[in-house]
Amino acid sequence: MTTITLRDTASPSGARPATAAGQGFRTATGGMIDRRRPLDFTFDGHRYGGFQGDTLASALLANGVRLVGRSFKYHRPRGILTAGSEEPNALVELRSGARREPNTRATVAELYEGLEASSQNRWPSLKYDVLSVNALAAPVFAAGFYYKTFMWPSALWEKLYEPLIRRAAGLGRAAHAPDPDTYDKAFAFCDVLVIGAGPAGLAAALAAGRAGARVILVDEDHRTGGRLLADRREIAGRSGADWAADALAELASMPEVRILPRTTLFGVYDHGAYGAIERVGDHLALPPAHAPRQRMWRITAKQAILAAGAIERPHVFGGNDRPGVMLAGAVRTYLNRYGVLPGRTVAIFTSGDDGWRTVTDVSAAGGQVAAVIDSRSSIPADLRRAAEAVGARVICDGYVTGTKGHLGLEAIEVVDTYGSRQTIACDCLAMANGWNPIVHLDSHLSRRPVWDETIHAFVPGALPSGMVAVGAAGGAFTLASCLETGGRAGAEAASACGFASAVPETPRTDPESLAHTPLWRVPVSKGKAFVDFQNDVAASDVELAHREGFRAVELLKRYTTLGMATDQGKTSNLAGLGIMAELTGQPVASVGTTMFRPPFTPVAIGAFAGHHRGKDFRATRHVPSHAWCEEQGAVFVETGLWLRPAYFPKTDETDWLKTVNREVNTVRAHVGVCDVTTLGKIDIQGRDALAIIERVCANPFGTLPVGKARYAVLLREDGFVLDDGTVARLGESHFVMTASTANAAKVMQHLEFCHQWLWPELDVQMVSVSEQWAQYAVAGPRARDTLLGIVDPGFDISNEAFPFLACADVTVGGGIPARLFRISFSGELAYELAVPAAYGDAAWRAIMAAGSAHGITAYGSEALSVMRIEKGHAAGAEINGQTTARDIGLGGMLAKKKDYIGRLMKERPALVDPDRPILVGFRPVDRSQRLRAGARFLAIGAAPSLAADEGTMTSVAYSPSLGHWIGLGLIRRGQERHGTRVRAYDPVRDGDIEVEICSPVFVDPKEEKLRV
Amino acid sequence: MSDGIETTLRPRSAWAGIAPVGRHGRPGGEPGLTLTLREEIGLATLIAVKGRTDALRQVLHERFGWSLPDTGTTSLTGERGLVWCGPDQWLALFETRREMAGLVQALQGLAAVTDQSDARAIVRVSGPDARAFLAKGLAIDLHPRAFQPGQVAVTALAHMGAQVWQRDASPAYDLAVARSFAGSVWSWLSHAADEFGYDVRNAEPVAQPRG
Amino acid sequence: MRIRCPHCGTRDNGEFSYLGDAAPARPDGMEAQPAAMHDYVYLRDNPAGPHRELWYHGAGCRSWLVVDRDTRTHEITGVSSARDVALSRRTGEVA
């Protein structure tokens, strides 16, 4: 910095400064910082000192650091505009390494020992930034620049424009390492939610809390009190800050009141649901051990009181973004709360009485007030006198038209009522252009704010029932009205929740005046006059949008990016609307306002995820044999939420296919066991149990005797297949239905829909028993021999007594109740044995022991899949929501004489079109070639085109039984074309091979193995 | 299960290999939570046969001394009794599985009885921080003004199905989840309980008379 | 959104899943006509305003519910058990 000696106190070499001595702009006394607790921190590698209670912004200002960042588009030097979460400029990267977080607001980042911060959007350094040449090309970057410029030639888009834009775009750098912190979530319920702990919120919480209501009070600040901490005010003869401290102490003593400081209410949702983020450990170098960094609250409230306050408006004039130009309220915050002089010589530019409050505060803190420029033509005499008493020049009916200074403010240019211009030296300019109630939260539910002409601001419109806005958030700007509306709302909210309450008396406050005439922009100013600091939107961009017809507020916003990005236009929105109102010659009320969306301030993605990341991103379900599978070194695969063993490699098996081939061969030659617990199992009982099964299944069940199971196919009402499974009849009116792993929950929901909504008159009792039973498929020629070793003697499971499709209750292992089903997915002699899940682990081990003499292998989902493809059984790839029973070869088994779900719609012409692709088998003509699922079928010689497409390969496997690849697929008129050849065209993987259409049953087509 | 089973098969707890017994989380001081792993409880779903709810109520009272709980409530004496779980549906709880013998017969024609003893993993959550802990995963209001001993909710815990009923005002809750989810539930539990410090224990074994 | 399940009390909408319009009645039985079935499966009004719709309390008591909701404001004016609604519809048919 060349002109002002502010930075002299900071050592550029990074040497440690004497903490207190380094803070040249710290007042000698005052402020709510703890001067006994000095803290060191670094900014862009330089070391500085601050105190406990500082924010990064207040500590930087205390050290005379005004330049903290570069702007988004033009890379203009920027400083600190505000003292709160509305800050558009002072966005910094906090921390380093894996904890580096971009775009944090210096104005809300609490200082802690060792804090590391760095500026953003600059290279090679904050002071000398290469891309600041963008500012010279500013006319090029005006509103609509991207839309107009990067249209043509289109060939340049991918090669030039996109990489260029991507390099220049964005603010800050995200961390590249996994986030080492933990995040928590919690639900909270209350009668009355109070959002904001300023005077209105405190009064509301007190009134509701005293009535006995359950109250949650949230405030984004770490210290409650709001503007009472920032302005020197009096309530009931005491300082406002003392009153706030007492209020907090009383609230803390109430058992039903929960106070959440450092908590931002970021979203309002339907029916009294709210989202809030609590920064549990962000004010510390590291989150405390065993505590999360942040906690996401989902709050449900019967009544909500919005007391979020208001945001001050900047003036729009040339150079209003120069570091040192600040909001007047922020200047007072730094003076009164943090004991920091934002400048030694302060000028004040105001359009209302409120800005004059800054005069005495600056003066009391030892600063010089150079001038007060008021845009109004008349000003109260007492204000003028007070300013003149401290030596300030007073300019009435004047404007600030420009600023000077290299990387920070050195002087302002002023024009007075006579048009005469002067330059006034100052290092800080305080702007006071009135306040906007924070209407963000109440517009989250599409409630559009309405214009209030008396306070020249948008105020909440009609709010949902149970929600009220009070204090400044409701447009009641005086301290007295904050306390009054807050107290009343607190009492009324408690009453609405059934608590006896009385509207409290409003304590007496010091006098104040809010007279104000807003100035949407300074009419005569030079240079870029910024409306939206964060998006670099200037008044000239609004003019351009107006000229080009983007006048409606929603278009203005999208065309110029006004009010977008992380600050959602908190400081900027109204100025843009005001200028558009001027240009179109209509009142602001007619221009209207855009809406605000959640979140109110940015929320880390990690906080939304909470515990649910990495392996906990979603739940994992384990099969009963899981422990054994892990011991055996099984390779697992995710199937929905389930983690299933895919295959069990032996030590010498380096290739998965080798393992799967061994498993298949062993099953086909000897015996294997597979955990099929993942299937859905639904217990169906009752007088009408059969009736509901008949209506939900497309094939007939009336003839199913007790002790038998049958394959079942379920359709959707639109005629497509929903799922397939089995139904076993355990008793006259007792059935158990299985559903596929993927559709288990869906089928249960479907059955409940049918029972509760379609046919409530049926006497049926259904419950899922999926979790109760471990179920194991034991398959292969030695399956029965194996089972004889675990099923208790006394149960005859011979082929005669227990033939194919039999089912029975048995006991295993000496009395453990079990269910045995003779069903087969592999095509082998096979059983499914169900045992209570707690015995699943032991039963599995017992089966392995019983089968060891017979050469048993455990097999996983891969071998299971190979064997079902060898047998031509349709599974998920074929039952994909787009196929009918006819498509997958099940048309013949459908019932003719009963009504069932999907009966009529499956007959629609397109679904019975003979040209519809139908399930058949495929094998490569050259048997050494590999098949690929997803390949499209084309006639040999046909050019690939949509019209030539004949179907798709749905499932493929290497068949160890046949020694080559086989496939299942859906192809036009497939059943008539066995023996003919087509192309399996797979351009994505460079596949284009000839395949032969064949029966989908590749192994044991006569089913000789099944029934022995 | 009837007496006199001489099985060689040993049941495996739903929490086996998942929930390590001992003190965890924030060290020092009294733990905020105690998580007691419940084992060997007998559980069965009762679903009333259409139109037989009153008769069911009567038989349950006469044969077991149980009253059929209203919507959203439990009717428990010690570790036995009934927990509501849906319209015309209840969960019958027994201290041991063997006590369940005879239930199906007793309720023949009145309710479908389905054994669910192995379908759930159950943990008892107690201690001064029990409410704050459960509030991290259950989207229901557990404040004493809203939820008290004798109340039950069927809901979700961190996106996983769960049923929770309050045992006493200390407060203590029983939390039941699907068995196959036990690993993920415990992963959530240990994350959420970390800040409070927690003790994991096995339930006191029930004295099993050998016949 | 929060929905008051008649069995479980008011719960977050994450516990529920949405099906759609509760008005269409399934044309049951062997005598049902394809045209009527087509309308039942596909034809729906899409009102901006009050709407009777089916929701499923899948993460709770597993009840199907009939919810009266204003599609513009999400205001819910009534929730009943679908089974009760269906039974009373049947009674209405008989009467």
Image: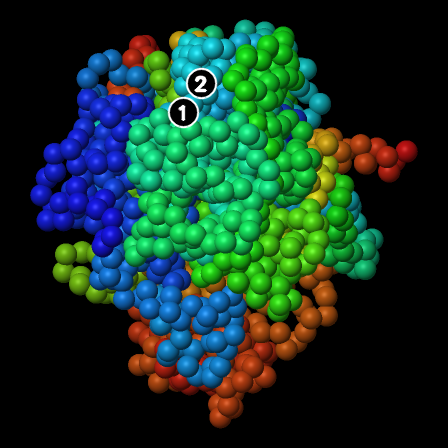
Alpha carbon separation for disc pair 1 and 2: 7 Å
Q: Residue at x 27, y 29 (%)?
A: A27
Q: Position of residue A1000 (x, y in %)?
A: 48, 70
Quarter of the image with the C terminus of chain A in it: bottom left
Residue on which the image places disc 2:
A240
Q: Is residue C36 left or right of residue A700?
A: right
The numbered mark, 1 or 2, whose residue comes first in the sequence reads: 1
Residue type pointed to by label 1? Leu
- Residue at position x 41%, y 81% in the image: A156
Amino acid at the residue labelled 2: Gly
Q: For the residue labelled by badge 1, is the local secondary structure a helix, a strand or a loop?
A: helix
Q: Residues within 10 Å of mark 2 (few under 14, many from 20)?
A: many
- List the residue tagged with mark 1: A229
Chain that bears disc 1: A
Specify whether residue A790 is in view: no
Residue A417 screen position, x and y as percent:
56, 49
